[in-house]
Image (cartoon, rainbow, N blue to C red):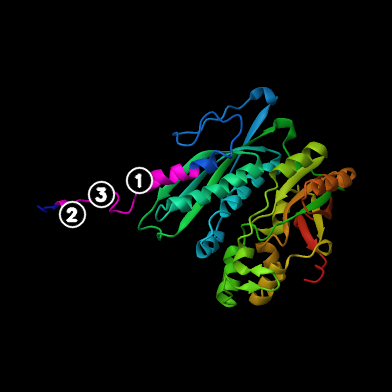
Amino acid sequence: MIAHTDSQKATYAAAGVDIEAGDEAVEQLKPWAEKATRPEVLDGIGGFAGLFKLKLDRWKEPVLASSTDGVGTKLAVAQAMDIHDTVGIDLVAMVVDDLVVCGAEPLFLQDYIAVGKVVPERIAQLVKGIADGCVQAGCALMGGETAEHPGLMAPDHYDMSATGVGVVEADAVLGPDKVKPGDVVIAMGASGLHSNGYSLARHVLLEIARMPLTGHVEELGRTLGEELLEPTRIYAKDCLALAAETDVRTFAHVTGGGLAGNLARVVPQGLAAELDRGTWTPAPLYALIAQRGRVEREEMERTFNMGVGMVAVVAAEDTDRALAVLTARHVPAWVIGEVGKTTDSDAPRALLRGDHPRF
Protein backbone atom coordinates (compact mmCIF):
# COMPACT_ATOMS: atom_id res chain seq x y z
CA MET A 1 0.00 0.00 0.00
CA ILE A 2 1.37 3.41 -0.99
CA ALA A 3 0.84 6.25 1.45
CA HIS A 4 0.44 9.84 0.24
CA THR A 5 1.30 12.90 2.30
CA ASP A 6 -0.82 16.05 1.93
CA SER A 7 1.92 17.61 -0.16
CA GLN A 8 1.77 14.67 -2.58
CA LYS A 9 -1.99 14.76 -3.24
CA ALA A 10 -2.71 14.92 -6.93
CA THR A 11 -4.79 17.82 -8.27
CA TYR A 12 -6.01 18.88 -11.69
CA ALA A 13 -3.93 22.06 -11.40
CA ALA A 14 -0.80 20.05 -10.56
CA ALA A 15 -1.46 17.96 -13.68
CA GLY A 16 -1.39 21.15 -15.71
CA VAL A 17 -5.05 22.15 -16.09
CA ASP A 18 -5.93 25.47 -14.45
CA ILE A 19 -9.73 25.78 -14.17
CA GLU A 20 -9.47 29.24 -12.59
CA ALA A 21 -7.36 30.50 -15.51
CA GLY A 22 -9.99 29.09 -17.85
CA ASP A 23 -12.72 31.00 -16.04
CA GLU A 24 -10.64 34.17 -16.19
CA ALA A 25 -10.11 33.64 -19.92
CA VAL A 26 -13.88 33.46 -20.44
CA GLU A 27 -14.35 36.73 -18.58
CA GLN A 28 -11.67 38.47 -20.62
CA LEU A 29 -12.97 37.25 -23.98
CA LYS A 30 -16.64 38.10 -23.32
CA PRO A 31 -16.41 41.77 -24.38
CA TRP A 32 -14.95 40.75 -27.73
CA ALA A 33 -17.36 37.88 -28.33
CA GLU A 34 -20.37 40.07 -27.51
CA LYS A 35 -19.44 42.42 -30.38
CA ALA A 36 -20.04 39.62 -32.91
CA THR A 37 -23.78 39.03 -32.71
CA ARG A 38 -27.02 39.13 -34.68
CA PRO A 39 -30.64 39.78 -33.67
CA GLU A 40 -31.41 36.06 -33.95
CA VAL A 41 -29.03 35.14 -31.10
CA LEU A 42 -31.04 34.27 -27.99
CA ASP A 43 -28.34 33.93 -25.34
CA GLY A 44 -24.81 35.06 -24.64
CA ILE A 45 -21.44 33.42 -24.05
CA GLY A 46 -21.24 30.87 -21.25
CA GLY A 47 -24.15 28.50 -21.85
CA PHE A 48 -23.84 24.84 -22.75
CA ALA A 49 -25.23 25.49 -26.22
CA GLY A 50 -25.81 28.54 -28.38
CA LEU A 51 -29.37 29.35 -29.37
CA PHE A 52 -30.15 30.96 -32.72
CA LYS A 53 -33.74 31.64 -33.78
CA LEU A 54 -34.07 31.00 -37.48
CA LYS A 55 -36.76 33.33 -38.80
CA LEU A 56 -38.43 31.05 -41.32
CA ASP A 57 -40.70 33.78 -42.64
CA ARG A 58 -37.64 35.32 -44.27
CA TRP A 59 -37.12 32.31 -46.58
CA LYS A 60 -39.50 30.20 -48.66
CA GLU A 61 -37.39 27.04 -48.60
CA PRO A 62 -34.23 27.57 -46.53
CA VAL A 63 -31.25 25.27 -46.97
CA LEU A 64 -28.62 25.16 -44.24
CA ALA A 65 -24.95 25.03 -45.18
CA SER A 66 -22.07 24.20 -42.84
CA SER A 67 -18.29 24.37 -43.04
CA THR A 68 -15.39 23.50 -40.74
CA ASP A 69 -11.79 24.64 -41.11
CA GLY A 70 -8.68 25.80 -39.29
CA VAL A 71 -5.79 28.22 -39.80
CA GLY A 72 -2.94 25.77 -40.33
CA THR A 73 0.72 26.52 -39.74
CA LYS A 74 0.24 30.27 -40.04
CA LEU A 75 -0.28 29.89 -36.29
CA ALA A 76 3.42 29.07 -35.94
CA VAL A 77 4.25 32.55 -37.23
CA ALA A 78 1.81 34.17 -34.80
CA GLN A 79 3.31 32.23 -31.91
CA ALA A 80 6.88 33.08 -32.93
CA MET A 81 5.95 36.78 -33.26
CA ASP A 82 3.84 36.71 -30.08
CA ILE A 83 1.02 38.40 -32.02
CA HIS A 84 -2.31 36.68 -31.49
CA ASP A 85 -5.09 39.14 -32.38
CA THR A 86 -5.24 38.56 -36.16
CA VAL A 87 -5.21 34.79 -36.74
CA GLY A 88 -8.83 34.67 -35.58
CA ILE A 89 -9.73 36.71 -38.66
CA ASP A 90 -8.01 34.05 -40.77
CA LEU A 91 -10.04 31.36 -39.05
CA VAL A 92 -13.35 33.08 -39.78
CA ALA A 93 -12.34 33.72 -43.39
CA MET A 94 -11.56 30.07 -44.04
CA VAL A 95 -15.00 29.05 -42.81
CA VAL A 96 -17.40 31.75 -44.03
CA ASP A 97 -15.86 32.11 -47.48
CA ASP A 98 -16.41 28.40 -48.04
CA LEU A 99 -20.06 28.88 -47.03
CA VAL A 100 -20.66 31.77 -49.42
CA VAL A 101 -19.45 29.78 -52.43
CA CYS A 102 -22.88 28.14 -52.65
CA GLY A 103 -24.60 31.47 -52.02
CA ALA A 104 -25.17 30.90 -48.31
CA GLU A 105 -25.32 33.84 -45.90
CA PRO A 106 -23.15 33.04 -42.84
CA LEU A 107 -25.34 33.02 -39.71
CA PHE A 108 -23.12 31.95 -36.84
CA LEU A 109 -19.79 30.39 -35.99
CA GLN A 110 -18.42 28.38 -33.07
CA ASP A 111 -14.71 28.05 -32.39
CA TYR A 112 -12.45 25.49 -30.76
CA ILE A 113 -9.12 26.55 -29.28
CA ALA A 114 -6.68 23.96 -27.94
CA VAL A 115 -3.78 25.27 -25.83
CA GLY A 116 -0.85 23.85 -23.91
CA LYS A 117 -1.54 26.30 -21.09
CA VAL A 118 -4.40 28.73 -20.63
CA VAL A 119 -3.10 32.29 -20.59
CA PRO A 120 -6.26 34.42 -20.26
CA GLU A 121 -4.80 37.45 -22.02
CA ARG A 122 -3.72 35.36 -25.02
CA ILE A 123 -7.08 33.59 -25.26
CA ALA A 124 -8.80 36.98 -25.21
CA GLN A 125 -6.60 38.17 -28.09
CA LEU A 126 -7.39 35.07 -30.13
CA VAL A 127 -11.12 35.55 -29.58
CA LYS A 128 -10.80 39.26 -30.39
CA GLY A 129 -9.58 38.25 -33.84
CA ILE A 130 -12.40 35.75 -34.26
CA ALA A 131 -14.95 38.38 -33.22
CA ASP A 132 -13.44 40.93 -35.62
CA GLY A 133 -13.73 38.38 -38.41
CA CYS A 134 -17.34 37.60 -37.55
CA VAL A 135 -18.21 41.30 -37.65
CA GLN A 136 -16.60 41.55 -41.10
CA ALA A 137 -18.58 38.52 -42.26
CA GLY A 138 -21.87 39.62 -40.70
CA CYS A 139 -22.25 36.46 -38.62
CA ALA A 140 -22.59 35.85 -34.89
CA LEU A 141 -19.98 34.22 -32.67
CA MET A 142 -22.07 31.69 -30.74
CA GLY A 143 -19.42 30.57 -28.27
CA GLY A 144 -17.03 27.67 -28.46
CA GLU A 145 -14.55 25.68 -26.44
CA THR A 146 -11.11 26.31 -24.99
CA ALA A 147 -9.31 23.09 -24.08
CA GLU A 148 -6.09 22.92 -22.08
CA HIS A 149 -3.81 20.05 -23.13
CA PRO A 150 -0.77 19.92 -20.80
CA GLY A 151 1.78 17.29 -21.75
CA LEU A 152 0.34 17.09 -25.26
CA MET A 153 1.09 20.64 -26.36
CA ALA A 154 3.89 22.99 -25.31
CA PRO A 155 2.73 25.78 -22.95
CA ASP A 156 2.98 28.50 -25.61
CA HIS A 157 1.41 26.49 -28.42
CA TYR A 158 -2.19 26.49 -29.55
CA ASP A 159 -4.37 25.35 -32.42
CA MET A 160 -7.72 26.69 -33.63
CA SER A 161 -10.66 25.50 -35.68
CA ALA A 162 -14.25 26.58 -36.19
CA THR A 163 -17.53 25.48 -37.66
CA GLY A 164 -19.89 27.92 -39.34
CA VAL A 165 -23.52 27.60 -40.38
CA GLY A 166 -25.20 29.56 -43.16
CA VAL A 167 -28.49 29.59 -45.01
CA VAL A 168 -29.48 29.97 -48.65
CA GLU A 169 -32.80 29.84 -50.48
CA ALA A 170 -33.19 26.46 -52.19
CA ASP A 171 -33.69 27.97 -55.64
CA ALA A 172 -30.72 30.32 -55.14
CA VAL A 173 -28.07 27.69 -54.42
CA LEU A 174 -25.02 28.38 -56.59
CA GLY A 175 -22.89 25.66 -58.14
CA PRO A 176 -21.51 23.93 -61.23
CA ASP A 177 -24.97 23.20 -62.62
CA LYS A 178 -25.48 26.91 -63.28
CA VAL A 179 -22.21 27.47 -65.20
CA LYS A 180 -22.59 27.97 -68.96
CA PRO A 181 -20.28 28.43 -71.96
CA GLY A 182 -19.39 32.08 -72.41
CA ASP A 183 -19.57 32.89 -68.70
CA VAL A 184 -16.88 35.27 -67.47
CA VAL A 185 -14.51 34.55 -64.58
CA ILE A 186 -13.84 37.54 -62.31
CA ALA A 187 -10.92 37.48 -59.89
CA MET A 188 -10.97 39.14 -56.48
CA GLY A 189 -7.57 40.16 -55.15
CA ALA A 190 -6.07 38.49 -52.10
CA SER A 191 -4.63 40.40 -49.16
CA GLY A 192 -1.63 38.06 -49.02
CA LEU A 193 -1.01 34.33 -48.65
CA HIS A 194 -4.25 34.13 -46.64
CA SER A 195 -4.03 30.83 -44.72
CA ASN A 196 -2.60 28.34 -47.19
CA GLY A 197 0.90 27.30 -48.16
CA TYR A 198 2.55 28.34 -44.91
CA SER A 199 4.42 25.07 -44.48
CA LEU A 200 6.21 25.69 -47.78
CA ALA A 201 6.59 29.44 -47.17
CA ARG A 202 8.12 28.86 -43.73
CA HIS A 203 10.39 26.13 -45.05
CA VAL A 204 11.73 28.37 -47.82
CA LEU A 205 11.96 31.70 -46.04
CA LEU A 206 12.86 30.64 -42.50
CA GLU A 207 14.81 27.42 -43.02
CA ILE A 208 16.39 27.65 -46.47
CA ALA A 209 16.84 31.44 -46.73
CA ARG A 210 17.18 31.85 -42.93
CA MET A 211 15.31 35.15 -43.01
CA PRO A 212 14.34 36.52 -39.56
CA LEU A 213 10.66 37.22 -39.00
CA THR A 214 11.54 40.57 -37.44
CA GLY A 215 13.83 41.64 -40.27
CA HIS A 216 12.72 44.38 -42.67
CA VAL A 217 12.42 43.14 -46.26
CA GLU A 218 12.84 45.88 -48.86
CA GLU A 219 10.69 44.14 -51.48
CA LEU A 220 7.83 43.85 -49.00
CA GLY A 221 8.15 47.28 -47.40
CA ARG A 222 7.83 45.81 -43.90
CA THR A 223 9.10 42.92 -41.79
CA LEU A 224 8.70 39.36 -42.99
CA GLY A 225 6.58 38.53 -39.94
CA GLU A 226 4.20 41.41 -40.62
CA GLU A 227 3.81 40.29 -44.21
CA LEU A 228 3.13 36.68 -43.27
CA LEU A 229 0.59 37.68 -40.61
CA GLU A 230 -1.45 39.90 -42.93
CA PRO A 231 -5.04 38.81 -42.19
CA THR A 232 -7.04 36.95 -44.81
CA ARG A 233 -9.50 39.11 -46.73
CA ILE A 234 -13.09 38.09 -45.95
CA TYR A 235 -15.28 38.12 -49.07
CA ALA A 236 -18.60 36.90 -47.64
CA LYS A 237 -20.51 40.21 -47.69
CA ASP A 238 -18.99 41.17 -51.04
CA CYS A 239 -20.05 37.89 -52.63
CA LEU A 240 -23.57 38.16 -51.24
CA ALA A 241 -23.85 41.72 -52.59
CA LEU A 242 -22.59 40.55 -55.97
CA ALA A 243 -25.09 37.68 -56.08
CA ALA A 244 -27.92 40.06 -55.16
CA GLU A 245 -27.14 42.49 -58.00
CA THR A 246 -25.82 40.29 -60.82
CA ASP A 247 -26.31 36.86 -62.32
CA VAL A 248 -23.64 34.93 -60.47
CA ARG A 249 -23.38 31.26 -61.46
CA THR A 250 -20.98 30.22 -58.71
CA PHE A 251 -17.96 31.26 -56.64
CA ALA A 252 -14.68 29.48 -55.92
CA HIS A 253 -12.74 30.14 -52.72
CA VAL A 254 -9.04 29.91 -53.56
CA THR A 255 -7.42 27.93 -50.75
CA GLY A 256 -5.26 24.78 -50.73
CA GLY A 257 -4.88 23.53 -54.29
CA GLY A 258 -4.52 26.97 -55.80
CA LEU A 259 -6.55 29.00 -58.26
CA ALA A 260 -7.05 26.47 -61.05
CA GLY A 261 -7.53 23.56 -58.65
CA ASN A 262 -10.32 25.24 -56.73
CA LEU A 263 -12.06 26.74 -59.75
CA ALA A 264 -12.12 23.29 -61.36
CA ARG A 265 -14.31 22.10 -58.47
CA VAL A 266 -17.18 24.35 -59.62
CA VAL A 267 -16.90 23.86 -63.39
CA PRO A 268 -19.03 21.00 -64.77
CA GLN A 269 -17.86 18.27 -67.10
CA GLY A 270 -17.84 19.35 -70.72
CA LEU A 271 -16.72 22.88 -69.87
CA ALA A 272 -13.35 24.44 -69.01
CA ALA A 273 -12.35 27.82 -67.61
CA GLU A 274 -9.31 29.31 -69.32
CA LEU A 275 -7.50 31.89 -67.19
CA ASP A 276 -4.93 34.45 -68.32
CA ARG A 277 -1.88 34.99 -66.12
CA GLY A 278 -1.22 38.22 -67.99
CA THR A 279 -4.15 39.95 -66.29
CA TRP A 280 -2.37 40.44 -62.97
CA THR A 281 1.00 40.54 -61.24
CA PRO A 282 1.38 38.51 -58.02
CA ALA A 283 2.67 40.45 -55.00
CA PRO A 284 6.44 40.46 -54.32
CA LEU A 285 6.13 37.81 -51.59
CA TYR A 286 5.33 35.12 -54.16
CA ALA A 287 8.40 35.96 -56.23
CA LEU A 288 10.50 35.97 -53.06
CA ILE A 289 9.37 32.43 -52.18
CA ALA A 290 9.84 31.18 -55.73
CA GLN A 291 13.34 32.64 -56.04
CA ARG A 292 14.69 31.78 -52.58
CA GLY A 293 13.35 28.25 -52.70
CA ARG A 294 13.76 27.62 -56.45
CA VAL A 295 10.09 26.65 -56.43
CA GLU A 296 8.72 25.76 -59.86
CA ARG A 297 5.74 27.76 -61.16
CA GLU A 298 3.48 24.69 -61.16
CA GLU A 299 4.26 24.09 -57.49
CA MET A 300 3.70 27.75 -56.63
CA GLU A 301 0.32 27.77 -58.34
CA ARG A 302 -0.73 24.51 -56.73
CA THR A 303 0.26 25.68 -53.24
CA PHE A 304 -0.54 29.41 -53.09
CA ASN A 305 -3.42 31.63 -54.20
CA MET A 306 -0.90 33.75 -56.19
CA GLY A 307 -2.85 36.90 -55.36
CA VAL A 308 -6.41 35.73 -56.10
CA GLY A 309 -8.48 34.86 -53.04
CA MET A 310 -11.93 34.37 -54.58
CA VAL A 311 -13.35 34.11 -58.07
CA ALA A 312 -16.88 34.62 -59.35
CA VAL A 313 -18.30 33.07 -62.48
CA VAL A 314 -20.91 35.47 -63.88
CA ALA A 315 -23.06 35.80 -66.96
CA ALA A 316 -21.12 37.66 -69.65
CA GLU A 317 -23.70 40.46 -69.89
CA ASP A 318 -23.24 41.23 -66.19
CA THR A 319 -19.46 41.62 -66.34
CA ASP A 320 -19.33 45.41 -66.13
CA ARG A 321 -21.96 45.52 -63.40
CA ALA A 322 -20.11 42.88 -61.36
CA LEU A 323 -16.85 44.80 -61.57
CA ALA A 324 -18.65 48.02 -60.57
CA VAL A 325 -20.21 46.34 -57.52
CA LEU A 326 -16.87 44.98 -56.31
CA THR A 327 -15.03 48.24 -57.00
CA ALA A 328 -17.63 50.15 -54.99
CA ARG A 329 -16.99 47.74 -52.12
CA HIS A 330 -13.21 48.36 -52.38
CA VAL A 331 -12.45 44.83 -53.55
CA PRO A 332 -9.71 44.62 -56.21
CA ALA A 333 -11.37 42.82 -59.13
CA TRP A 334 -10.68 42.11 -62.79
CA VAL A 335 -11.69 39.74 -65.58
CA ILE A 336 -9.32 36.81 -65.45
CA GLY A 337 -10.83 34.41 -67.97
CA GLU A 338 -13.81 32.78 -69.61
CA VAL A 339 -15.66 29.47 -69.61
CA GLY A 340 -15.79 27.49 -72.85
CA LYS A 341 -16.77 24.06 -74.12
CA THR A 342 -14.36 21.14 -74.29
CA THR A 343 -14.69 17.78 -76.01
CA ASP A 344 -11.81 16.22 -74.07
CA SER A 345 -13.24 14.52 -70.98
CA ASP A 346 -9.75 14.23 -69.49
CA ALA A 347 -8.87 17.91 -69.96
CA PRO A 348 -8.57 20.05 -66.81
CA ARG A 349 -11.71 22.04 -66.04
CA ALA A 350 -9.63 25.11 -65.25
CA LEU A 351 -6.21 26.01 -66.59
CA LEU A 352 -3.83 28.96 -66.60
CA ARG A 353 -2.18 30.27 -69.75
CA GLY A 354 0.42 32.91 -70.53
CA ASP A 355 2.87 34.58 -68.17
CA HIS A 356 2.59 37.02 -65.30
CA PRO A 357 4.03 40.45 -66.12
CA ARG A 358 7.19 41.24 -64.11
CA PHE A 359 7.06 38.00 -62.12
Residue 338 in percent (x, y) is at: 84, 53
Disc 1 and disc 3: Cα gap in Å?
Answer: 13 Å
Q: Nearest the camera: 308 or 174?
A: 308
Q: Which residue is drawn at 69% across and 59% down?
A: 305
Residue 12 among those drawn in magenta? yes
Q: Mark 3 points at which residue?
A: 11
Residues at discs 2 and 3 in contact (Cβ within 8 Å): no
Q: Could you tell me the amino acid type at mark 1? A: Glu
Q: Which residue is drawn at 35% across and 58% down?
A: 151
Confirm whether residue 24 shows in the render: yes
Q: Do the residues labelled 2 and 1 touch (CB within 8 Å)?
A: no
The part of the chain drawn in magenta is 6-29
Q: Residue furthest top?
A: 57
Horizontally, residue 296 falls left or right of residue 211, namely right
Residue 136 highlighted magenta (yes or no):
no
What residue does disc 2 label? 8
Camera-nearest residue between 303 and 116: 116
Q: Distance between the residues labelled 2 and 1?
A: 21 Å
Alpha carbon separation for disc pair 2 and 3: 9 Å
Name the mark nearer the viewer: 2 or 1: 1
| Callout 1 secondary element | helix
Instruction: State the SS at label 3.
Output: loop
Mark 2: which amino acid?
Gln
Q: Would residue 309 be found to the left or right of residue 32 on screen?
A: right
Question: Label 1, on which residue?
Answer: 20
Q: How crowded is mark 1: few (under 14 residues within 10 Å), some or many (20 or more)?
A: few
Q: Are marks 1 and 3 in contact (CB under 8 Å)?
A: no
